[in-house]
Each structure stands twice: as structure tokens, then as C-alpha cells.
Image (tube, helix red, strand yellow):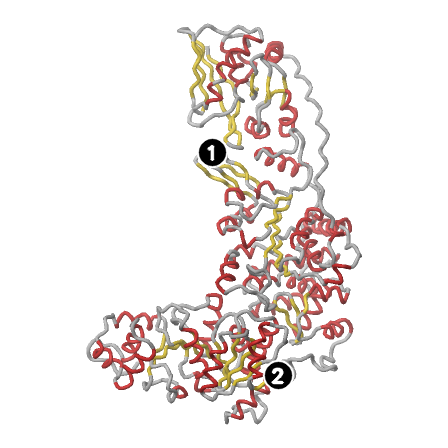
């Protein structure tokens, strides 16, 4: 922590956190307060009631880092943004967002298997390529993207709406901890703040600010992810969308984005191209050393059925099974009926394919990766 | 003169031994009953007096005091009539004092001295062991079920007095009425398609693995579960007796005096309360649905709609096979060795979280899946995701494999497992590849230590079903696929 304030021995960070914790102070007021003064000066000038020491203790206990606009540790990429949060809270390494190029993977909270599969694959492939995946740790697409991204590679970045002391949604608590450990979880809300509705659009804006490219994997008509898109578009950040079936309600938003001129994302290559167009170069990408792991199939078009000839090393029933699988998940029932195989043999074959990374199951439905 | 006669009374569904003490002394003629009698027991004064006089036995014109020990337990019902009457006869020396030493009496008296039916005879008979039991002739068959030759039936008080005086032979117990036809179990042939669901049923039946089916409405969850009893082996005589005892205690025997021979299948509605499910009641300690399902199948349809407390209460009986119900009236242990089959939708709207058709909010979904705590979910060895069958399969006029074929496989698998257990031999070790697969899953965090154990057990059952000596990779894979539904309900 930086220079301690004379009065109570508290660091500047404590006053920044205290200012952000005052209920009457919204993002704009906070920005105004801190525009000219240091946090401690702003605090003593504004004379808000509140126990700075206690607020600070709550943050310290949970290991929450605090930085303010213009202060040390504040992410450089936010500094010139007119809407940048005046005070930023962070769990994990606050510098994580500055080390690697960043791509936001966002989308609906009730996705299809297709969306979950695509998000997880993009998350894993981007992380392996040295691109930080930014997402909101919500259920659905956000969670799936980070599940993929936390496997290995570049540090994952999360932006959440509520206080960092209380994981929300609870079901993602473990993922939350993993992201904080490997990368960083950011929030504009001080500890103890519950996740209120109005904070989500604000969160989505910060998410866009932290990203070099925004990719919407699946979104409904007027889904929450479109706030992120709006914020990105306003800042000239390229926005891509994953095309989906015209019959799927969860692709209405993304297909609409494509119609509006967003670039189509049919594979990780499309995202890399967008990054390169922004002048972001991947560390070691030229050497091809950071290429995707085996079987990750990051190339354009990998979302479609693999070309015939893929998986040539299989023979017999496993080969036939692999041919039956596509990126469209099918139920085990369906496979059992079509192949006429006994279930132990069928499951054995699928498990072998899964082990080699060419197939996977989501809740009992199987698809080709 | 004092006489002490053994009897039993019902506390709810449970019998408790009662000692009936009758004291006859000089004094103003009168008849008092003490020891927490309820109205029916107090009225037995008049019944006993009239019955004695109608049977040609003299009523003492002296002071008669009856004490029902233990005095602290409330006694109800007319079942103590017979014991009081016999006590009066002994106390007034109309019967030899030692003739009742090894006997207990339960029965209601009519004013004409005849013996009448008493409800809950199996529980009463249990409570009077090891004494021989004398009951109304109409109840003798039921008492015989649990006590065998130690149960005697008489039709009237005068007949009883004669037998006791002359140490005569007891009348023969009437033969059992013909057993009612067992309830029809629907056949698996009606189920179209559903290879995974059928396979899961077989594994559940062969290894007694608790089964949770997760699928959208119309995926056949209920249909499959109703056919599960058909795959289980029939009740053994001892199991049959346990089931009969519990059913008698709950007052839902099909026919008095007949053993329950069919496998119980209970499917309580999801509005069932905790007490209805596990048993209880303030004075009447009745067995709940889980006890009525003992040695059979308990089916919880729409598991996500059951009260949270009721579901959590299942955990301990699932582990121990016994439920202990404690109330002000006492503590009772009921058997609860049931096979649990449950069905639930993936989310409140039923459409599931992966098809994009789900209209539930996060809060709805969280509330729904919260019903299923991790410890409870861990009790299910099989969590099977079911899908709606393909339309062409549904419409095809090809019947599915009938229950008989499936049941034969299950029986063979159970025989194999029993032979192995009987031989006392340790389970053959896992095949190398199978062990490697489990190790991978453990390292990936897909399985916990407990999950590992469960998967290995299910895989053993799968191997038994296909007749394999050793558990190999395919059996483990199968077991893993049969718990894939966990992803759906915990997401």
C-alpha cells in the first residue's frame, strides 16, 4: 500500500474504498470528487459519515485491491476513457489485464449446448494462444468461456457487478476463485454491496472497456450482452458475433448483430484477425509456438463438422461412432438406437473418443469437438 | 385376591406390553380402572361385567380395582377387555392362578361374552412375545403370521374359561383366505425406445442403486419408474413378513391375515409432508411412505417440488435402512430399506438448460436445483439424463423388450453378485485400463473420492449384467454415462 495518511494511519486506498461505499455517491459523483483531489482529501472535504477503518478492514481481510483513477496500479487501458470507473476493486493480480491482449466472450445466461460448446472451446483456445479471456462470470456463456479459459494459458479476466466479497451467482463460486487465482476479478462495487440490477449494464460497460475485441457467442433478442456491444461500439472496439440457427431464439441477438455489420466469428482465427487489425500482436504467435493444443481445432470452420478424413487414426466401431457425431449434440439414446450397440460398448467407445479430445458430453449429450 | 395378566395396547401403530392387575377385596361393591385409561377402556367395566354374567360366570359383589401398568402410558381401545375379564376370573378364584402365567390376552368383549376383532393385531402380537397369545378367533390368522403356534384363537369367554380350567386343546386356527391377486405391474414392452432409461432401470434393479432420472416432460420418467418393481426379485418370506408388519401398523393391509407377497411400490405425491414421508404423528406413531416402501420401490415423481425438509429427511434412512421416529409418545424404529427412484425436470419450466427453450430465470432455476443438496444427490448412484424419444420411434408399432427378458438378465446379474459375495472372495481387481480411466477422471476433478467409489460399484453391476468377470474400461464408461445427469441438475 502507498503512503499512509497522517490522521488515522490509513492508506489512500482506504479512503477510495470509503468514498465508493457511500450510498449517495454514484459513479459520476465519485469521478467528480476524485478528479482533483486525492481520496483522503476528497473524503475530508466531503465530510460523509462512515467508518473508513472498518470499510478498509473489510477489503483487506478479503484481499481486495483498491485503485483509483490516476492512482498507482490503475489499469492503463482505462485511463483515457471518459466513463472509466473512478475507483476500481480487484481480486487477484490487478496488472493481469495489461499483460496480454484481451477478448471478451459474452452471451446469454440460458444458452444452448451449441453456445456452451463454442464458448468453452473459444475460451480454451484463446487462453492457449496467449489471449486473456474477459467475461462476466454469469451463468451460461460467461461461465463456459471461463471454464475453458482457466484450463491453462493467459490469465483470465472477470468483471462482476457486485462486491468482491460475495461471489454471485453462487454456483460459479469455485470458478470465481479460480479466475481470481490465475488472473483477476474486477468490480466497481466495494465489498458488501449486493448485486443490484442497475449494476449489470455498468459492469458490461467496464467489461467492454477492458477488451480489445468483443465476441458475442449467443444472445437473445435484446439480451443483456447487447449492453456490452453498445459500449464497445461506442469506443470503436470491434464486435464479432457467432452465427447461429435462424430457428434458435438464443441466436436472434447474434444474428441481428451480424446483420448490423458485426464481423462473423466462425473460429478462433476470426478473432485473431480482428485483434491483429487493431494492431495487437500475440506474443510468439509468429513463431507458431503458442499454437493451439492438440485437437483444439482452432482454425476457421472448426465449428462445423470436421472434414471427412479427420480422426483417421480410428478404426472399426469407434470410427463409425466418430462419424455419427457432429457439432450438433445428440442424446445417448439416439446413438444407442442408430448404432444398435450395447450401452457398455457404446459408452466405452465414446469415452475413448472423449479421452482423445475429439468428442465430449454435456449433460449426457454427445458432440464432436 | 390379586391377579396379574399380560396384555398389550397400541400406541399409534406400535404395540406396547401392558400388565393388567386386578384386585378384588371386601368393601362397597364397585369397579374402578386406573392407569391412564381412555374412554374406551373405562367403558370396558360395563362390557366385562355383562360378558361375565352372559357367560354364566358369577360377578363378584365386592370391590374390584384394575390397574393398567405401566401407569404412565396412555392406553386406548377395547383390546384390554379380555385381559380384564380373565383377571377378574383369576382374582375371584374361578380360574386356577397359575394357568395364565405363560399367556397374554388381547380381545374385545361383546355383551354376550363373544370375542370381537381388535385392529393392529400384528403389532400387538409382536409386543406380547415371548408369551403365548390368546386372541379372538377372527384375529388368530393375523397373530399366527408373526407368532406361529404361539398364537391361539377362541370365539367366546366361556370357551376360554373351559380351556383354561381343563387345560384343554386350543381350537384350530382358520385357514388363510385366498391371497388377493397382486396389483398389475405395467410391462416394459409398452416403452418405446429409451435404451438408456431401460439400461438404467436394469442396473438399478440388479445392484440396488438409487436412481434419479432427469428429463423434460414427456421423456418417459414416470413410465419407466412404474416398471421398476417388475425387474426386482420377488419378496423372500422374511421380507414379506416385514412388509406385512409395516402395512398392518399403517392400517393398510389389503386383507387381514394375509401376507403381503407383492413388491411394494409407493409413489407419494409431492405435496407429501415430512411426517407422511418418514412417519410420525404426535401420539399415533405411524410408519411413513419410506417404511411402506421397504423391500420395494419408493418413487418420488417431480422430486424438485417436494418440501426441502422432507427430502433431507431421507438421507439418514437411505444410509441406515431404518428410520427412528421420536415423539412425546415414545420412540419407534421402522424399517426403511427401499430402492429410491426419483424423477425431476431439469428446471421448473421443464425444457432444460441446454436447448435454449428454457424460460426460467436464474432465480427460478437456483430455487429448483437447491432442493437437491449435494449430500442428497450423492445418495444417487445413477443420475440419468433422459431425452424425449424420437418421433418415428414413438409411432413405430414395434413393442419394446418385455419386462420378463430384462428381469431375467437382472436375476442372472444378482445371482452372479451373490455367488461372489457368498464365496467371500474379494472383488476381482479392475482391469488396468479401467483403473487408468478412473484415475484420469479423479485427476480432472470430474470425480470425488466418494464418486469414485460409486462409479466403481455401478461398474461392477454393469459387468455382472453383461456377465463379465472383471470390470473393464467399458463398464466404467457406462457407469460414468449413467451419472451424466449430475451436470444437468447442478448447473
- Residue where numbered disc 1 is placed: B283
Is disc 2 placed on a helix, strand or loop? loop
Q: In which quarter of the image is the C terminus of chain A?
A: bottom right
- Residue where numbered disc 2 is placed: A266
How far apart are the two marked residues, 2 and 1, measured between alpha carbons?
Answer: 69 Å
Q: In which quarter of the image is the N terminus of chain A?
A: bottom left
Residue B333 placement (x, y as % from top left): 52, 38
Q: At 36% across and 69% down in the image, what residue appears?
A: A193
In the rendered structure, the answer to whether residue A44 lies left or right of residue B75 reads left
Q: In which quarter of the image is residue A231?
A: bottom left
Question: Crowding at label 2, few (<14), some or many (≥20) Cα neighbours within 10 Å?
Answer: many
Q: Mark 2 lies on which chain?
A: A
To the question of a shared chain for discs 2 and 1, the answer is no
Residue B345 placement (x, y as % from top left): 59, 58
Q: How many labels does the image show?
A: 2
Residue B182 placement (x, y as % from top left): 71, 38
Q: At 59% across and 78% down in the image, what residue appears?
A: A121
Question: Crowding at label 1, few (<14), some or many (≥20) Cα neighbours within 10 Å?
Answer: some
Q: Quadrant of residue B329?
A: top left
- Camera-side residue of A274 and B292: A274
- Camera-side residue of B467 and A126: A126
- Camera-side residue of B142 and A78: A78
Residue at the extreme left of the image, as rendered: A7
Q: Mark 1 lies on which chain?
A: B
In the rendered structure, the answer to whether residue A294 lies left or right of residue B282 reads right
Is disc 1 placed on a helix, strand or loop? loop
2 or 1: mark nearer the eye: 2
Residue A42 placement (x, y as % from top left): 24, 80
Amino acid at each position: 500500500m502507498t503512503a499512509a495518511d497522517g490522521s488515522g494511519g490509513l492508506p489512500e486506498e482506504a479512503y477510495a474504498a470509503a468514498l465508493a461505499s457511500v450510498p449517495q455517491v454514484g459513479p459520476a459523483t465519485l469521478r467528480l470528487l476524485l478528479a482533483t483531489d486525492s481520496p483522503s482529501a476528497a473524503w475530508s472535504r466531503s465530510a460523509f459519515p462512515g467508518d473508513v477503518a472498518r470499510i478498509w478492514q473489510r477489503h483487506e481481510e478479503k484481499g481486495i485491491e483498491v485503485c483509483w483513477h490516476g492512482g498507482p496500479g490503475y489499469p492503463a487501458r482505462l485511463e483515457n476513457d471518459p466513463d472509466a470507473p473512478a475507483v476500481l476493486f480487484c481480486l487477484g493480480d490487478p496488472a493481469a489485464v495489461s499483460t496480454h491482449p484481451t477478448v471478451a466472450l459474452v452471451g446469454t445466461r440460458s444458452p444452448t449446448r451449441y453456445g456452451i460448446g463454442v464458448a468453452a472451446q473459444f475460451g480454451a483456445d484463446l487462453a492457449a494462444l496467449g489471449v486473456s479471456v474477459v467475461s462476466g462470470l454469469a451463468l451460461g456463456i460467461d461461465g463456459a468461456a471461463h471454464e475453458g479459459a482457466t484450463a491453462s494459458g493467459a490469465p483470465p479476466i472477470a468483471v462482476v457487478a457486485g462486491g468482491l466479497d460475495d461471489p454471485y451467482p453462487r454456483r460459479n463460486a469455485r470458478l470465481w476463485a479460480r479466475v481470481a487465482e490465475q488472473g483477476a476479478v474486477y468490480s466497481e462495487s466495494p465489498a458488501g454491496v449486493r448485486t443490484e440490477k442497475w449494476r449489470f449494464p455498468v459492469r458490461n460497460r467496464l467489461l467492454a472497456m477492458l477488451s480489445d475485441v468483443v465476441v458475442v457467442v449467443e444472445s437473445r433478442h435484446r439480451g443483456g450482452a447487447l449492453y456490452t456491444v453498445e459500449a464497445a461500439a461506442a469506443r470503436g472496439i470491434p464486435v464479432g458475433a457467432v452465427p447461429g440457427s435462424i430457428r434458435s431464439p438464443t441466436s436472434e441477438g447474434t444474428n441481428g448483430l451480424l446483420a448490423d455489420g458485426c464481423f462473423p466469428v466462425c473460429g478462433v482465427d476470426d478473432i485473431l484477425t480482428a485483434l491483429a487489425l487493431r494492431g495487437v500482436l500475440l506474443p510468439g504467435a509468429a513463431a507458431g509456438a503458442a499454437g493451439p493444443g492438440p485437437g483444439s481445432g482452432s482454425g476457421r470452420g472448426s465449428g462445423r463438422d470436421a472434414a471427412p478424413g479427420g480422426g483417421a487414426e480410428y478404426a472399426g466401431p469407434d470410427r463409425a461412432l466418430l462419424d455419427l457425431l457432429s457439432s450438433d449434440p445428440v442424446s445417448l439414446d439416439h446413438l444407442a438406437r442408430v448404432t444398435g450397440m450395447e450401452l457398455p460398448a457404446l459408452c466405452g467407445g465414446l469415452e475413448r473418443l472423449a479421452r482423445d479430445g475429439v468428442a465430449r458430453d454435456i449433460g449426457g449429450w454427445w458432440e464432436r469437438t | 385376591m390379586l391377579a396379574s395378566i399380560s396384555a398389550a395396547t397400541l400406541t399409534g401403530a406400535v404395540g406396547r406390553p401392558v400388565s393388567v392387575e386386578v384386585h378384588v377385596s371386601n368393601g362397597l361393591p364397585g369397579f374402578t380402572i386406573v392407569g391412564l385409561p381412555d374412554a374406551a377402556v373405562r367403558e370396558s367395566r360395563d362390557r366385562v361385567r355383562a360378558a361375565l354374567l352372559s357367560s354364566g360366570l358369577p360377578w363378584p359383589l365386592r370391590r374390584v380395582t384394575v390397574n393398567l401398568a405401566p401407569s404412565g402410558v396412555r392406553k386406548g381401545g377395547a383390546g384390554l377387555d379380555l385381559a380384564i375379564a380373565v383377571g377378574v376370573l383369576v382374582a375371584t378364584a374361578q380360574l386356577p392362578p397359575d394357568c395364565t402365567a405363560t399367556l397374554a390376552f388381547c380381545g374385545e368383549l361383546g355383551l354376550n361374552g363373544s370375542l370381537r376383532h381388535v385392529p393392529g393385531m400384528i403389532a400387538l402380537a409382536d409386543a406380547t412375545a415371548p408369551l403365548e397369545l390368546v386372541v379372538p378367533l377372527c384375529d388368530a390368522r393375523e397373530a399366527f403370521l408373526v407368532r406361529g403356534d404361539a398364537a391361539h384363537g377362541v370365539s367366546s369367554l366361556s370357551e376360554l374359561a373351559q380351556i383354561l380350567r381343563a387345560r384343554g386343546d386350543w381350537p384350530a386356527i382358520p385357514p388363510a383366505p385366498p391371497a388377493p391377486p397382486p396389483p398389475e405391474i405395467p410391462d416394459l414392452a409398452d416403452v418405446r425406445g429409451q435404451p438408456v432409461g431401460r439400461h438404467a432401470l436394469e442396473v438399478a434393479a440388479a445392484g440396488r442403486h438409487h436412481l434419479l432420472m432427469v428429463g423434460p416432460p414427456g421423456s418417459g420418467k414416470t413410465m419407466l419408474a412404474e416398471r421398476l418393481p417388475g425387474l426386482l426379485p420377488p419378496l423372500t418370506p422374511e421380507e414379506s413378513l416385514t412388509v406385512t408388519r409395516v402395512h398392518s401398523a399403517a392400517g393398510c393391509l389389503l386383507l387381514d391375515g394375509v401376507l403381503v407377497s407383492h413388491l411394494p411400490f409407493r409413489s407419494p405425491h409431492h405435496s407429501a409432508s415430512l411426517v407422511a414421508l418418514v412417519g410420525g404423528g404426535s401420539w399415533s406413531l405411524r410408519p411413513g411412505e419410506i417404511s411402506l416402501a421397504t423391500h420395494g420401490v419408493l418413487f418420488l415423481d417431480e422430486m424438485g417440488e417436494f418440501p426441502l425438509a422432507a427430502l433431507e429427511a431421507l438421507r439418514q434412512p437411505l444410509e441406515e435402512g431404518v428410520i427412528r421416529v421420536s415423539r412425546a409418545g415414545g420412540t419407534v424404529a421402522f424399517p426403511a430399506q427401499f430402492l429410491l427412484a426419483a424423477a425431476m425436470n431439469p428446471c421448473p419450466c421443464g425444457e432444460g438448460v441446454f436447448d435454449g427453450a428454457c424460460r426460467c430465470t436464474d432465480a427460478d432455476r437456483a430455487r429448483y436445483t437447491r432442493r437437491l443438496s449435494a449430500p442428497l444427490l450423492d445418495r444417487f448412484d445413477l443420475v440419468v439424463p433422459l431425452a424425449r424419444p424420437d418421433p418415428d420411434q414413438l409411432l413405430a408399432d414395434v413393442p419394446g423388450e418385455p419386462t420378463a427378458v430384462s428381469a431375467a438378465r437382472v436375476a442372472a446379474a444378482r445371482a452372479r453378485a451373490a455367488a461372489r459375495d457368498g464365496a467371500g472372495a474379494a472383488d476381482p481387481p479392475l482391469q488396468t485400463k479401467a483403473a487408468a480411466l478412473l484415475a484420469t477422471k479423479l485427476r480432472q476433478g470430474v470425480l470425488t473420492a466418494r464418486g469414485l467409489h460409486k462409479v466403481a460399484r455401478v461398474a461392477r453391476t454393469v459387468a455382472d449384467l453383461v456377465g463379465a468377470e472383471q470390470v473393464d474400461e467399458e463398464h466404467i464408461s457406462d457407469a460414468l454415462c449413467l451419472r451424466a445427469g449430475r451436470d444437468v441438475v447442478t448447473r
